[in-house]
Image (cartoon, rainbow, N blue to C red):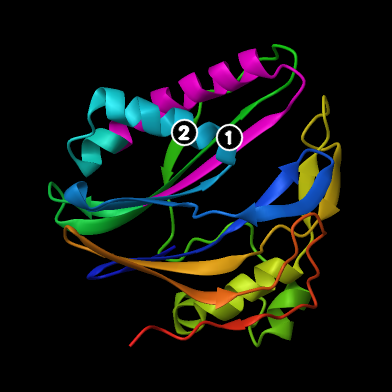
Amino acid sequence: MLRHDAGIELFSDGGKYAGYEDFSFQGTASKSFILPSISTVMCSIGAPLIPMLMRHGFEHRWISFQHLLDSLPAAMLCALETAQRLEPRYYFVALLSIGGYSPERGRWETWSIYGSAPPRGGKIEAPVLRPSQRAYFHPRPDDTALRRYGFEADADFNALAENPIGFMRAMRATPQYMGKIGGAAADASTGHTIGGFIERVILENEAALTNVVWRWPDRVGSMIDPNNEGGPVALPL
């Protein structure tokens, strides 16, 4: 997610994965949630919890960007409690990036909120909402992947803004962690979890544009191959 003076630009992948202990690619789905009436866009990690969060939003009728920010910690806590009750074997993790316009402060803002629920009724830490940097990508690529796609290890906002697709490709090339059934967060296997496509969302005041800008020919049921570079998608005329 990139925060510009005139709006928000979001890049997210469309990969779905089997889940715990299994990194196999299971298809594609958009991970962005656009609320143009309140000039807000959100991007999720931890897909099973997102429908619960959105249901909370519909029930409480988010009427402004600030209203959404104020209600998110309670909404994520409720979602984590529900997930833990329904699936006590799993260690649930949820991360939400939020970008939007604050009329009260007269500026575009970016925030993030993280929460997790341990298995078997363990204590859920209260999710905390925090402001995020102008350029916020998670997870961050390792140095080897950054160099592979032309970035310095300490790439700044300008470098990311000039080549966000390259940064997403570096994320794909970096092994990530995925928890095991019944395990702690540190008890994890590794694999690659950026796939399917790259979707770009441009959000300005009460208006949004979205399109797929890159696509990988990942096969359902197979593991992500980080050496499969894919290619750009031609924009419609």
Crowding near the residue tagged with mark 1, few <14, some 14–19, many ≥20 C-alpha atoms within 10 Å = some
Q: Give the labeled residue for mark 2.
A: 51
Q: Position of residue 51 (x, y in %)?
A: 47, 33
Tell me the number on the disc at residue 227.
none
Q: Relative to 59, is 21 above or below?
A: below
Q: Are marks 1 and 2 in contact (CB under 8 Å)?
A: yes
The dominant secondary structure in magenta is: helix
Task: Decide which of 187, 36 is in the foreground and name it.
Answer: 36
Indicate the amino acid at tag 1.
Answer: Pro
What is the magenta range?
Answer: 69-98
Task: Decide which of 216, 134 is in the foreground and name it.
Answer: 216
User: Horizontally, is 236 left or right of 67 in the view?
Assistant: right
Which residue is located at x 57 percent, y 41 percent?
A: 47
User: Horizontally, is 181 left or right of 8 in the view?
Assistant: right
Tell me the number on the disc at residue 48.
1
Instruction: Check if residue 147 falls in the magenta segment.
Output: no
Where is the N terminus found, in terms of image quarters? bottom left
Residue 220, picture quadrant: bottom right
Q: Position of residue 84 (x, y in %)?
A: 64, 18
Q: Position of residue 198 (x, y in %)?
A: 54, 69
Q: Relative to 60, is 47 above or below?
A: below
Can I make out residue 155 in this image?
Answer: no
At mark 1, the secondary structure is helix
Which residue is located at x 23 percent, y 43 percent?
A: 65
Q: Position of residue 187 (x, y in %)?
A: 86, 36
Task: Decide which of 235, 20 is in the foreground and name it.
Answer: 235
